[in-house]
Amino acid sequence: MEHSKFHQTAWENVLQWEKNLVEYQGNDFERTYERWLNQAFEALPDYWKDPITQSIDQWIFHIYALFHETSIQNEAKERILSTAKAFNDEIQNFEDLKNLPLSQLNYIADREQSKHRIYSIIQGGLVGTGRTIFSSISIPVTLINNIRVVQLMSYIYGYDLSSPYELMTSLKVFHAATLPKRYQGEAWLSLKNDLLQKEKNSSYFYDGEEQIISKEWIEFGMDELIKLVAIQLFQPKKDGRFPLLSVVMGVQFQYSLSKRVASFAHHYYMYRYLLQHKNKVEKP
C-alpha cells in the first residue's frame, strides 16, 4: 500500500510539474527578446540558416556520443551501480535498476544532482573571476556538464545509452532541457509522443525526427554569450580587487541552468519509470 501511495504521489507531482511547464507563457521581455532573435535569424541569407543549425546539431551529437565513454562518466556509472548494489545485491547492470523502488532511485538521482550543482558552482565561480582561459571554455564546459547530468539520469533509471534509441532520446531530453522555458512545454509533449510510439513499436532504433537542435535553441547560445559579457562588465576596475560581484553572478547563472536541466531530465526519466510500472499494474 505504501509503495503504491508513493508512486501515486510521485505521478501527481510529475503531472503538476508538466502542467506548470506547458502553461508557462513567458513575460513581455522574453517575448520581445524572442521576436528580436527571430528577426535577426530570418535576416540571415537562406544558405546560412540550415548549415548553422546542422553544424551545431552535429557538434552536439559528437560531444554527446564521445563523452558518455570518458573515464569521468564511466566512474560515475560505476558509482551509480555500486550504490544500487548496496540496496539490492542482485543488481548486475543498468537495466536491473528499473527493478529498484522509486524511493531508492530518487535517492541516487538526488545525490548525483547535488554533485552536478557543485560542479556548476565551481565552474560559475571560475568564470566569474574574469580570467580569459575560463571564459573561453565556458560554453563548451557548460554543455558537457549538462550533457553529463542528462546521461546520468538516464542510467539511474535503467536506460543504457548503448542503445541507439536511448542515445537519441537522451539527446532530445538535453535539447528540451536547455531550451528557454517558454518552449519547454511543447518539447516535453513531443518527448511524450515519442515515448508513446516507443511503447507501441518497442524499437531498438530511433524512428523519429533525428534533427536535434532547433532554431529556438540558438537562444540558449545567445544567453550564454550575454552572461559572459555581463560578467566582464562587472569586473572591478582596479587591479588586485577580488571580483566578488562577477563571481556571484557566474555562480548564480550556472547554478540556475544546472538545476533547470537536471530537474527536467529527472522528471522525464522518472515519468518513464512510473509509466512503465503503471502499465504493468494495469495489464490484465
Image: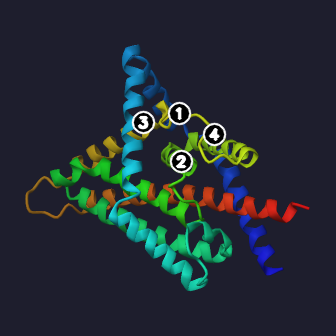
Q: Quadrant of residue 60?
A: top left
SS at circle 3: helix
Q: Which residue is mark 2?
A: 164
Q: Provide residue 37's location: percent of width, then percent of height.
A: 43, 28
SS at circle 4: helix
Q: Of the residues under marks 2 and 4, which one precedes in the sequence?
A: 2
- Out of 31 and 112, give the one closest to the viewer: 112
Which residue occupies 36% across, 47% down? Answer: 63
Query: In the displayed image of the protein, which residue is found farthest to the left?
Result: 239
Q: Quadrant of residue 42?
A: top left
Q: Which residue is mark 4?
A: 186
Q: Of the residues under marks 2 and 1, which one precedes in the sequence?
A: 1
- What's the CA distance linking mark 2 and mark 1? 36 Å
Foreground mark, 3 or 2? 2
Residue type of the residue flagged with mark 2: Pro
Residue type of the residue flagged with mark 4: Glu
Which residue occupies 84% across, 80% down? Answer: 1
Answer few, some or many: residues within 10 Å of disc 1's Cα (few below 14, many 20 plus, some between 14 and 19): few
SS at circle 1: helix
Q: Which residue is mark 1?
A: 31
Q: Provide residue 17's location: percent of width, then percent of height.
A: 67, 56
- What's the CA distance linking mark 3 and mark 2? 17 Å
Q: Are marks 3 and 2 in contact (CB under 8 Å)?
A: no
Question: In the visual, does 242 lie left or right of 140?
Answer: left
Foreground mark, 4 or 3? 3
- Whether 156 is drawn above or below 256: the answer is below
Residue type of the residue flagged with mark 3: Asp
Q: Which residue is mark 3?
A: 57
